[in-house]
Image: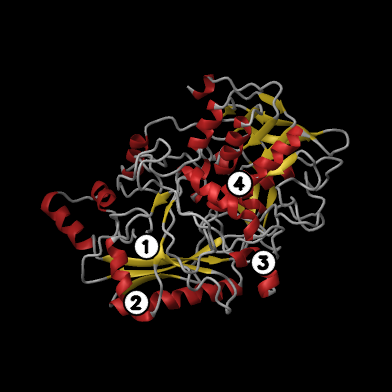
Amino acid sequence: MPEQRDRTPVSDADVCIVGAGPAGGILAHRLAEAGANVVVLEAGRRFDESRRNQLDRHIRPGLGNPWEMGGPRDRFTSTGDAFYPLNAARVKGVGGTTLHWQGMVMRLHERDFELESRHGVGVDWPLSYSDLKPYYAEAERELGVAGAVDNPYAPPRDEPYPLPAFAPSHSDSIFAEACERLGIDMHSVPNARNSEPYDDRAPCQGFGTCKPVCPSGAKYTAESHVEKAEQAGATVIDRARVRRLEHDETGERIVAAAYTTPDGETHRQSARQFVLACGGVENVRLLLLSDSDQHPDGLANSSGVVGKFFMEHLFAGMGGRLDRDTRQNHVGFNTSECHQFYDDADPVNGIKLEFLNYAGPSPVIDALNAETWGDELLGELRDSYGTHISMGALVEQLPREDNYIALDTETTDDLGDPVPDVHWSVDSRTKDALSRANEIQREVLAGLGVDIEWTVGPDNTGPAFHHMGTTRMGENPESSVVDAEGRTHDCSNCWIAGSSVFPTGGAMNPTLTIAALALRTAGAIREALDA
């Protein structure tokens, strides 16, 4: 049982990393491989059971969420104008949210790093696309990205993808008919899943259940980097819930991470360097829980912006039925998209169009939950399946100070600690971009003769569950939390990794940028250890 594992602190640790998702896993591997004594503290457990068993839990009625989110451990509140369903898509466990992510990995565009300079909105990053470009290439090799250099709107690159792109799906060919007439460019989607064997992982087997479970292991999860880190000598302690970071008398250096294990014992893990890699919500919560006389507003928060500028990607979508075979739900991930409208002048917010491969009901899940049998059930499935078609889009949300993560001191988790409060709303500029995405989608679907049955747009949009911006990077300590390498301005041995350091979020899925920044930060931490 997990409770019987050794969860006591590691002696003489060089680096303590909080969180075993993609940022934490990559950092742990790189630093352990370089000879550092690394310990990783992960709040969730190891999911050691077969992915096939987890798939059963997903598709069979009444077996529950395979990733065990929710309950007293994961309490939160939402007090903004729009309710934020925090637990709907995050995962606490070794591997983090990559355990159930969809696996799309794009580079941010050059404009994303220079949004204020180019468009007069948001802020500029303290680094450029050129600074991150070599780390993007390295991240693509680390994750095993399948893609093709066929996107005329993508930022410049110097090398091919590690793996060939997945072929366009059958429904992509249907979309192409309308897009060609409308002058809309389709191109392949870079995916962190194997199109051929790579890094000891099998190629995609086409289960079509990528989110929430990839039974074949073709899709990248951070478990692979955690395993490599352990092989290089790192120690990973699961179900170790870090509740506070302790500092020295000056408040300038972290000396220990206090964590509680399932037996109720609290331990102190000391180290020379500390990294927070537990996501855009939990990074903030831990810093705020670590307040002290020297840091009365929370650790590393002399700027007052810890938790501020919370950003999301908003979803716009549209779909319906077509009087032909669309074969959607045969593929569990997108194979084509469009960046043509990414840098529209009006509105400024970026738009990434998606040609979805998973519209309509799932025949397997519908059959397992049906109340009919035999020919009657078969007739119902034939009538409902295979003729749906839909489009999606991710829309950029610009950083706003009134979107933030705070502590709800009136509500506590099962350990008695205040829970995160998500204060979030969707502003008018973002709604204008959502409307623009819907306009394009309607043009394409109408051009195909689709009977549109549903629309997700400005008034009923939802988040993509990409938590960004809450510990933003910048050159000025008065308006940012970390520098361009990820080191906090206030504490010389405290680093933050992940999408919480993004000054702006663009409209691209964030994981590749998370990985690229983690690789960059790993080099900076190695230099700090050698100093």
Q: Which mark is residue 513?
A: none
Alpha-carbon span between mark 1 and mark 4: 27 Å
Q: Is residue 167 visible?
A: yes
Which residue corresponds to mark 2?
A: 180
Of the residues shown, which amino acid type is indicated by label 4? Gly
x 61%, y 42%: residue = 278
Of the residues shown, which amino acid type is indicated by label 2? Glu
Q: Which mark is residue 279?
A: 4
Q: Which one is in front, 305 or 152? A: 152
Alpha-carbon span between mark 1 and mark 2: 17 Å
Q: Looking at the image, is 274 positioned above or below residue 267?
A: below
Graded by Cα atoms within 10 Å as few (under 14), some (14 to 19) or many (20 or more), the crowding at tag 3 reads: many
Of the residues shown, which amino acid type is indicated by label 1? Leu
- Coordinates of residue 419 in the picture (x, y in percent): 65, 45
Alpha-carbon span between mark 1 and mark 3: 30 Å
Which residue corresponds to mark 1?
A: 356
> Which marked residue is nearer to the observer: mark 1 or mark 3?
3
Q: Quadrant of residue 124?
A: bottom right
Q: Which one is in front, 318 or 214? A: 214
Q: Looking at the image, is 147 positioned above or below residue 316?
A: above
Residue lying furthest right in this view? 250
- Coordinates of residue 439 in the picture (x, y in percent): 44, 78
Alpha-carbon span between mark 4 and mark 3: 24 Å
x 75%, y 51%: residue = 481
- Coordinates of residue 353 in the picture (x, y in percent): 45, 68
Q: Does label 1 or label 2 sit earlier along the sequence?
A: 2
Image position of 438 (left or right of 370): right
Badge 3 marks a residue whose secondary structure is loop
Q: Kindly indicate whether the residue at mark 4 contacts the one at mark 1 (C-beta within 8 angstroms).
A: no
Badge 4 marks a residue whose secondary structure is helix
